Image (spheres, rainbow, N blue to C red):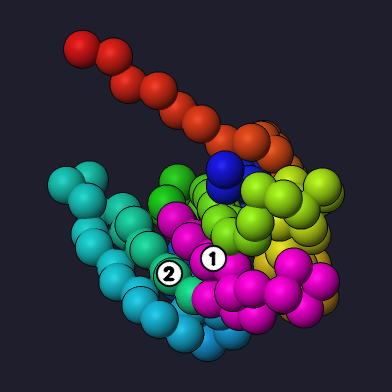
Amino acid sequence: MPYYLSAKVNSSYKSIFSILNLSMANIYFTEIAKKDGRSFGVLIGQKFNEKLNTFIGLIMLLTELNDQETLLEILVIGGSLQVINLPQELGKEAHKIIHLLKSKNFKLQICEEIPHMLREFSD
């Protein structure tokens, strides 16, 4: 199951999108303007994790909250169910993205972390 992390970043959407796009989105990225004029972006990347010996997928969703706040949602997917510490390894990858932003002097607050992301839908 994916590892989920969300954080509120105290910076403009464009700044965060640009840095993550250049650093992480080696598969796909797109941006849309919502009806209220605010931006929403999707970035998809993958990287090889040596400890898991497999590729993992990184999905990042960015939602512009206002001119100086952006919601970042990270989903890290991959690995084998036979890996005992899979959630911890996926969590490390999510936190590498957080560390990247902090190293660029972005201030942020982690809002939620779910090691075993599962959202069920009902009729």
Q: Looking at the picture, which amino acid does disc 2 mark? A: Leu
The answer to whether residue 17 is magenta is no
Q: Looking at the picture, which amino acid does disc 1 mark? A: Leu
Asked if residue 57 lies left or right of residue 107, the reply is: left
The answer to whether residue 49 is magenta is yes
The N terminus, quarter of image:
top right
In the foreground, 98 or 3: 3
Comparing labels 2 and 1, the label whose residue is closer to the camera: 1
* Residue 12 in sight from this viewpoint: no
Q: Which residues are magenta?
A: 46-62
Tell which residue pokes out farthest to the front in this image.
Answer: 82
Mark 2 or mark 1: name the one nearer the start of the chain.
Answer: 2
SS at badge 1: strand
SS at badge 2: strand
Residue at 45 percent across and 57 percent down: it is 62
Q: Which residue is mark 1?
A: 58
**Measured from the top left, where is residue 75 in percent x and y?**
55, 53
**Measured from the top left, where is residue 56 in percent x and y?**
59, 68
39 lies above or below 55: above
Residue at 22 percent across and 45 percent down: it is 36
Q: How many marks are shown on the rendered structure? A: 2
Instruction: State the predominant SS element of the stretch in magenta.
Output: strand
Report if the CB atoms under discs 2 and 1 are less than 8 Å apart: yes
**Measured from the top left, where is residue 29 in percent x and y?**
35, 75
Q: Which residue is mark 2?
A: 43
Asked if residue 20 lies left or right of residue 62, the reply is: right
Residue at 81 percent across and 71 percent down: it is 51
94 lies above or below 2: below
Within 10 Å of disc 1 (Cα), the crowding (few <14, some 14-19, many 20+) is many
**Measured from the top left, where is residue 58 in percent x and y?**
54, 65
The Cα atoms of the two marked residues, 2 and 1, are separated by 8 Å
Q: Which dot marks residue 87?
A: none
